[in-house]
Image: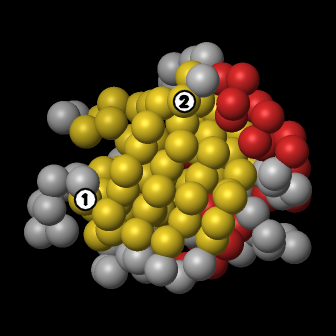
Amino acid sequence: MQEIEYKYLVDKKKWAQIEKPQPQLIVQGYLHSSVEKTVRIRIKGEKAYLTIKGKTVGITRSEFEYEIPMEDAEAMLSEMIDKKIRKYRYEVKVGKYTWEVDEFEGHLQGLIMAELEVESEDEKFALPDWVTVNVSEDERYYNAVLIGAVVPPL
């Protein structure tokens, strides 16, 4: 399966002014992280997932995601993963698209990013006014890199 995803920074002042749905807490960590692939454990709300992603080329990469038992995810995050990302995800509908907006906690506090998955790299869409800089191809904004960042790139 292919994932084609754009990533943008978010204007904090404009974001604070819009009406938002209830967010879901996400806690995630990486069992493996390299340029070629990442293997992630994620708890999102009441569900847990194992996700394997291939090398990113442009804004496209292979992605395989499987729901796993919550107890397994909690054990792996606790026993096998030292660094974790905690963020609150808002799913915001804008026209026919659903934007996923993440507000990070901990050492990434203050970083807000918006992601949009599309069907093809050529797909055209309008940007909400709270979206700013396109960081889709900036590796500093990959979650697997952010997890070890001393301070968030802004």
Question: Percent x, y for residue 16?
Answer: 63, 37
**Image side of residue 39 versus residue 87, left or right:** left
Residue 17 in sight from this viewpoint: no
Vertical placement of residue 39 versus 99, above or below: below
Q: Earlier in the sequence, mark 2 or mark 1?
A: 1
**Residue 111, image quadrant:** bottom right
Label disc, if present, on residue 54 of the rendered structure: none
Q: Name the residue under label 2.
A: 68
Q: Name the foreground residue: 124 vs 44.
A: 44
Residue 51 coordinates in the image, percent (x, y): 49, 49
Packing grade of label 2 (10 A; few <14, some 14-19, many >=20) is some
Question: Is any atom of residue 100 visible in this view?
Answer: yes
x and y, in percent, of residue 105 in the image: 80, 46
Where is residue 14 drawn, in percent x and y? 56, 45
Which residue is denoted by mark 1 in the rendering? 2
Residue type for callout 2:
Ile
Residue drawn at 69 percent across, 30 percent down: 72
Query: Which residue lies at the image location 49% right of the left edge and 72% below the top edge?
Result: 37
Residue under the image location 81 percent in, 51 percent down:
80
Q: Distance between the residues labelled 2 and 1?
A: 21 Å
Q: Is residue 145 above or below residue 131?
A: below
Assign a secondary structure to mark 2: strand
* SS of the residue under disc 1: strand
